[in-house]
Amino acid sequence: MMADTTLFELVSPEKLVMSKSVSMVVVPGAEGFFGVLPRHTSMLSTLAPGVIDVYEGDKITDSLFVVNGFAEVTEERCTVLAEEVILVDDIDTDKYEKQIEALKDQASRSEGDSAEKIRKNIEEQEHILAAMIKAKNT
Amino acid sequence: MPNLKDLKVRINSVQSTQKITSAMKMVAAAKLRRAQEQAEEARPYSQRMDRMIAALAGKMTNVGGPALLAGTGSEVKFLLVVMTADRGLCGGFNSSIVRATRKRIAELQENGKSVKLLCVGKKGADQLRRDASDLITDALEGVAKGAIEFAAASDIGARLIQMFEAGEFDVCSLIYNKFQSAMTQIVTEQQIIPASVPEEADATPSLGAYEYEPDEEQILAELLPRNVSTQVFSALLENTASEHGARMTAMDSATRNAGDMIDKLTLTYNRTRQAFITKELIEIISGAEAL
């Protein structure tokens, strides 16, 4: 009988954060959350900032917040690459708020193209922050 | 005949130099271990990213794909990212990179290409400024201070992509020292734009095609810039490990040389001292005999 688990790997640029056999992972895809069960069809997806829930048996064993990620799913594994990985319990929204403040400050002092770029960056960061707050409160 | 006092001073100064070099060696060894660990831990990320790109690129080749993958169509303007250390005293580490860079510049210019440089690390920039200052677009410092953060690499990556989109270059390569062992570093040139597609040798049996969400092009559009940063990051890590390795080796031989020198000087010192005593004795004896 084939084991009813799939290999889940979570990798950040610094290190392999997690690698274990799980019964299901729920991943925040760019077009909505999707669950990965064993023998899922192969797919590649970009991720929205959000929480990955790892299920072993029927329980969630790990919840991790990821930013700027990709997921590669094949029948026997699910690999997530993420630039930032934070445990949901360790989310520090203050840091992001400060960053956004600093960016806004920067934006008010620059003009033209660079201001446009910074504004875009702020939007992105705010998006991440909103996702963080949501993750923290659930 | 050398003066005894001078010799003593000399021995003392070599001894304090030896103390410094052996301390530096120890520090480098500790940093090397950390850098090596960091480089090792970062490997899975780039491996998996390669795998994804290989899977995607395989599909895209017939369509052409985005410029980061397929290139701009011409190969005239080259950008070399030269990675060196911020500090010296690490043997031939910096100069071997600079030498390789100079050779590459000459080679490219001979073939009628234009070359620009982006220096990461102070030492390389200092050396290259002497004869190629007009080619240097910018020099970054302090990137490899302490632990290397991915953010630093992604800043460089973002910058490269910005330059690429502005049409400032067609091909971009990294020149850095690949870590082989503490004794040997290999100067490596690695092309990052357009992305060199890794051969899918260990072909994970592609069970049919992947499904893509949202679609291939959008994923590639996000993946490729990240890949640039990732490659810069792993090159930075390799380079730092090499730097500490090179410094350790250099300081080890410096310590040994200082030891040899101290031995030699001590020998001369003792000989001179004996000669002195003998001379004094002779003077006393001949003085006594003369009476």
Image (tube, helix red, strand yellow):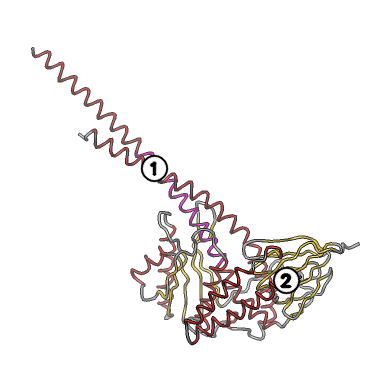
Decide: marks 2, 1 in contact (CB < 8 A)? no
Q: Looking at the rendering, in which quadrant would you find the N terminus of chain A?
A: bottom right
- Considering the whole magenta stretch, tell me its main secondary structure: helix
Q: Mark 2 points at which residue?
A: A135
Q: Which residue is drawn at 40% across and 45% down?
A: B20
Is residue A38 shown left or right of residue B238? right
The chain that hosts pointer 2 is A
The answer to whether A10 is drawn above or below residue B162 in the figure is: above
Q: Please tell me whether mark 2 or mark 1 is closer to you in this view.
A: 2
What kind of element bears circle 2? helix
Report x, y in % for residue A48.
Answer: 70, 76
The answer to whether A8 is drawn above or below residue B218 in the figure is: above
Q: Which span is picked out in magenta?
A: B233-261
Is residue B260 shown left or right of residue B165? left
Residue B107 covered by magenta stretch: no
Q: Residue at x 60, y 55 (%)?
A: B37
Few, some or many C-alpha atoms within 10 Å of disc 1 (few <14, some 14-19, many ≥20)?
many
Residue at the farthest right position: A1
Few, some or many C-alpha atoms within 10 Å of disc 2 (few <14, some 14-19, many ≥20)?
some
B108 or B249: which is nearer to us? B249
How far apart, in angstroms, are the residues tagged by discs 2 and 1?
Answer: 56 Å
Q: Looking at the rendering, in which quadrant would you find the C terminus of chain A?
A: bottom right
Instruction: Count the numbered circles shown.
Output: 2
Q: For the residue marked with disc 2, what is the amino acid?
A: Ala
The answer to whether B34 is drawn above or below residue B122 in the figure is: above
What kind of element bears circle 1? helix
The chain that hosts pointer 1 is B
Q: Which residue is drawn at 59% across and 82% down?
A: B70
Q: Residue at x 70, y 68 (%)?
A: A65
Q: Name the residue under label 1.
A: B18
